[in-house]
Image (cartoon, helix red, strand yellow):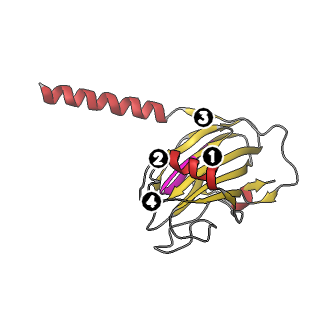
Amino acid sequence: MKSLLGKILAAAALFVGTTASAEIINLTPADPQPTGLKQGLSVVYAVNDRKVRTLGPAKRRIERFGEPGKPLAGLNYPDKGKDAEVLTSGRSILVSAMVNGYIKFPAAGTYGVEFYTNDGAQIWISGQTVGKLDKVTACASAGRPQVNVPKAGWYDIQVLYFQKEGTACFESEWTPPGGKRQLIPDSAFGYK
């Protein structure tokens, strides 16, 4: 009997999880639409202590010790192995970052988006969470939601990211309406 109840509960949990992940997140374009943007994204870095293992402490480090860093070209920084630079920080370990700017969707419609991170990250577009992984991990997906883009143009994007030690990655992909899954090009990002 316990086995049957366990199977029913597991099936129910799978159904609820699948239903929740199938929800489409509605985005709102930046208003007014920004002009004169530089390509890339702005970033503020803080050096972590070894206790930073989740997003909350990473955010507090940035608030307390953050300093502007070299802008990011975009959001594609694959794992390059141990001792490789984390994003544009000039460091290979113990990094927190707050990334800000805009992402340009070239057409209206429903996009699939996915972000990969090592270690943790939370990603917001139009103030809506579109990805979150709140732990120390190898390069892993922070979720694969679908987002509704009501019209082509610029949308606010923000990323809170931390890396503890070992290797690092942060990568971004989208599937445009009727298109194929691909890396989000650097040209899709801008900042003031």
Determine which residue is flagged by label 4. 50
Mark 1 or mark 3: which comes first in sequence?
Answer: 3
Q: Nearest to the eye among marks 1 and 2: give it.
A: 2
Amino acid type at circle 3 is Ile
Q: Which residue is mark 3?
A: 25
Q: Is residue 100 visible?
A: yes
Residue 159 in magenta stretch: no
Question: Mark 1 belongs to which amino acid?
Answer: Gly
One can see residue 180 in this view: no
Amino acid under disc 4: Arg
User: Percent from the top left, x then y, of residue 189?
Assistant: 73, 55
The residue that appears at 29% across and 31% down in the rendered structure is: 11
Magenta stretch? 111-122
Estimate the spatial distance between the alpha carbons at disc 3 and disc 4, rounded to whole Å.
Answer: 35 Å
Tell me which numbered mark, 4 or 2, is placed earlier along the sequence: 4
**Residue 150 at x, y percent in the picture:** 72, 35
Residue type at the position of mark 2: Asp
In contact (CB < 8 Å): disc 4 and disc 1: no
Q: Secondary structure at mark 2?
A: loop
| Mark-to-mark CA distance, 3 and 2 | 20 Å
Q: Who comes first in sequence, dot 1 or dot 2?
A: 2
184 relative position to 18: left or right: right
Disc nearer the start of the sequence (4/1)? 4
At 16% from the left and 27% from the top, the residue drawn is: 4
Left or right placement of residue 184 versus residue 118 in this view = right
Task: Tell me which numbered mark, 3 or 4, is placed earlier along the sequence.
Answer: 3
Q: Which residue is mark 2?
A: 134
